[in-house]
Image (spheres, grey):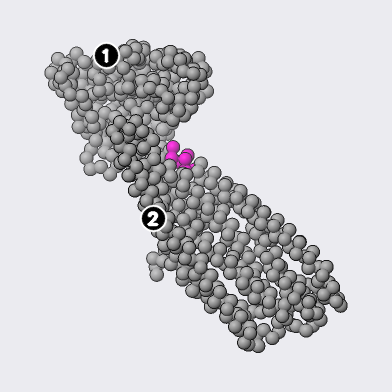
């Protein structure tokens, strides 16, 4: 029982939090409520007009005093008009009322639906913007620990589920819920004794709704996970389309996709079964209640005070309440899917963004970079990745990191812009610990070219002048391209610098993509330059051209170079050999070759690649 109460309270908290997103558009929410209220009221009058018509045909109205309880219209006319000939009045009044009821009902439906859609789309806009904005500020540990497909699915699929709760669910709850309330109030108004029959089935419906609710929540969580898996498989297949064809992996990829979609299909079928079973079950219970009403009405004196028209109108209202009541209960599946999606969305929104306790800023950086006994362990890992790293890079120096793969070189470089924070020791920039600098200020002094080049589906010029550099002059972009030896091939593109390069630069070769990334780093003109296998995709001729250009670019900045090709770092001022998270050797190329240690072995022509 305590667990059920806890689950209910959790659902209430989730929905309340969702409803806070309605506050900026509460005016539209109110207008929707008014519209659906008008819609529900017209439904009641549409039933009540039947009572007036039947009693008028029989010459009976509340005004004549033959019955104790008349309908709303009948009582209004008896209180305000003296009716000598009810049938004559009905001939004129009923057609007019029917048209007016239809007009007001339609207007109320339009108001309710339009403004609720406005509310729903506003919530989608706000949720998606919040999720994406936070995604750009979450720690790298969180990003790297999640499947990209699930992160994308959260912003696309899950938000759509929440939208259903705000639009479809609230539309149904307001429109049909208000209709149920109004019709039920009408039943009480006409004869409260008969109406007590309805209360018999309410507990049974409540039990059924509670059981199905738990089922929907479980299935909804599974559906969200399966949608993330589907997105992940598709993303990986698109990104690896060349490898997939070369290695003949189409069959295995199709198998992965079919496995993910089959699981999704099974969950959707389970959801459909639960959803399809709920409505007829509620319908049967309501029909039983209506059957009891008919039996009581025909076999007791409880309806003796009702005119024929009132009794027929009562039965029609009782029957009419079934559909909106069923709709209200059927919206349960939508609400449960939305709550499951909201729970997942708020889990991300509640994640702490990158810790930025820095208070200092440096307007000018010389580029002196020092590591003092730095240790680092990845979150959740048992072994240290970096163990007591210490070295100093003077302003303008080129420091190279070499060593076998997995030794910690890229991790070491990633600590400088604080993608991760060192778990021990200290990194100092110009005599200021980097954790005392604000993240934005620290990163503004760093340019990065990684081995995994990231380009965007935009023009060449916009890919070079990216982010904070988007307002740079074209002359500066062209100069950076010349230094990166990219200018000539850019001019050969169909639209030159205005040529769209496709998703992640798919229309460019690997070497061209790498040179675009190098041009971006050159354009930033930061005092610290990190080159993580920046020339790995270049042919020997292009590499030699860029190396000579980079030598000029590196003169006024501190450069950290990670390279597997030792020919690219022979001119480095300092070479650090990193093995298993430790610096095992340091010195110049000449010194390290002469020492005949680790570096000398790596430098041998017969040495295996790493």
Q: Nearer the viewer, residue 137 or 207?
A: 207
Residue 131 highlighted magenta (yes or no): yes
Q: Quadrant of the N terminus?
A: bottom left
Q: Nearer the viewer, residue 535 or 280?
A: 280
Residue assigned mark 2: 266
User: Alpha-carbon neighbours of circle 1 within 10 Å: few (<14), some, or many (≥20)?
Assistant: some
Q: Give the quadrant of residue 312.
A: bottom right
* Residue 179 in picture, x, y percent from top left: 63, 65
Q: Residue at x 60, y 84 (%)?
A: 296
- Looking at the image, is 171 positioned above or below residue 259? below
* Residue 544 in picture, x, y percent from top left: 31, 13
In primary-sequence order, the first of circles 2 and 1 is: 2
Q: Main secondary structure of the magenta part?
A: helix
Helix, strand or loop at mark 1 = loop
Tell me which segment is drawn in magenta.
Answer: 130-136
Q: Nearer the viewer, residue 77 or 525?
A: 77
**Left or right side of 168 for 210:** left
Residue 237: which disc? none
């Amino acid at each position: 029982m305590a667990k059920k109460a806890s689950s209910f309270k959790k659902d209430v908290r989730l929905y309340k939090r969702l409803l806070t997103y309605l506050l900026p558009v509460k005016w539209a929410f109110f207008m929707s409520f008014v519209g659906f209220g008008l819609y529900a009221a017209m439904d009641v009058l549409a039933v009540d007009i039947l009572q007036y018509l039947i009693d008028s045909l029989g010459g009976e109205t509340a005004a004549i005093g033959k019955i104790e309880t008349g309908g709303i219209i009948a009582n209004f006319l008896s209180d305000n008009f003296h009716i000598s000939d009810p049938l004559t009045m009905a001939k004129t009044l009923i057609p007019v009322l029917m048209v007016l009821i239809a007009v007001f009902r339609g207007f109320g439906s339009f108001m309710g639906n339009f403004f609720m859609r406005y509310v729903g789309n506003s919530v989608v806009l706000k949720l998606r913007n919040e999720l994406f904005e936070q995604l750009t500020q979450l720690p790298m540990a969180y990003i790297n620990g999640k499947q990209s497909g699930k992160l994308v699915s959260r912003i696309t699929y899950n938000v759509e589920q929440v939208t259903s709760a705000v639009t479809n669910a609230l539309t149904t709850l307001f429109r049909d819920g208000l209709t149920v309330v109004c019709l039920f109030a009408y039943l009480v108004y006409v004869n409260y004794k008969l109406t007590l029959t309805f209360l018999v089935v309410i507990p049974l419906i409540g039990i059924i709704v509670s059981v199905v609710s738990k089922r929907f929540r479980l299935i909804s969580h599974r559906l969200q996970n399966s949608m993330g898996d589907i997105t992940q498989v598709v993303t990986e297949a698109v990104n690896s389309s060349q490898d997939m064809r070369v290695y003949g992996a189409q069959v295995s990829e199709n198998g992965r996709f079919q496995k993910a979609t089959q699981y999704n299909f099974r969950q959707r079928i389970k959801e459909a079964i639960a959803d399809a079973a709920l409505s007829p079950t509620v319908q049967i219970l309501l029909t039983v209640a209506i059957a009891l009403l008919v039996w009581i009405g025909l076999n007791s004196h409880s309806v003796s005070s009702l005119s024929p028209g009132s009794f027929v109108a009562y039965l029609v209202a009782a029957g009419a309440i079934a559909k909106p009541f069923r709709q209200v209960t059927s919206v349960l599946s939508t609400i449960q899917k939305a709550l499951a999606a909201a729970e997942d969305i708020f889990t991300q929104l509640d994640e702490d963004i990158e810790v930025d306790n820095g208070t200092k800023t440096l307007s000018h950086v010389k580029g002196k970079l020092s590591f003092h006994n730095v240790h680092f362990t990845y979150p959740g890992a048992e072994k240290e990745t970096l163990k007591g790293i210490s070295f100093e890079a003077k302003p303008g120096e080129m420091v190279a990191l070499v060593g076998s793969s997995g030794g910690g070189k890229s991790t070491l470089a990633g600590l400088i812009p604080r993608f991760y924070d060192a778990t021990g020791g200290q990194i100092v920039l110009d005599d200021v610990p980097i954790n005392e600098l604000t993240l934005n200020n620290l990163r503004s002094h760093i340019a990065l070219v990684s081995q995994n080049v990231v380009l965007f589906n935009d023009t060449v010029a916009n890919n070079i002048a990216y982010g904070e550099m988007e307002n740079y002059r074209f002359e500066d972009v062209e100069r950076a391209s010349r230094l990166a030896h990219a200018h000539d091939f850019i001019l050969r593109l169909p639209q030159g610098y205005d040529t769209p390069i496709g998703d992640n630069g798919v229309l460019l070769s690997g070497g061209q993509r790498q040179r675009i990334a190098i041009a971006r780093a050159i354009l930033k003109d930061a005092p610290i330059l990190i080159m993580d296998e920046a020339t790995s995709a270049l042919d020997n001729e292009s590499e030699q051209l860029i190396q000579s250009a980079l030598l000029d670019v590196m003169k006024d900045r501190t450069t950290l170079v990670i390279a597997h090709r030792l020919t690219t770092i022979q001119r480095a001022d300092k070479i650090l050999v990193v093995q298993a998270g430790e610096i095992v050797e340091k010195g110049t190329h000449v010194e390290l070759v002469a020492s005949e240690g680790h570096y000398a072995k790596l430098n041998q022509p017969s040495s295996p690649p790493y």
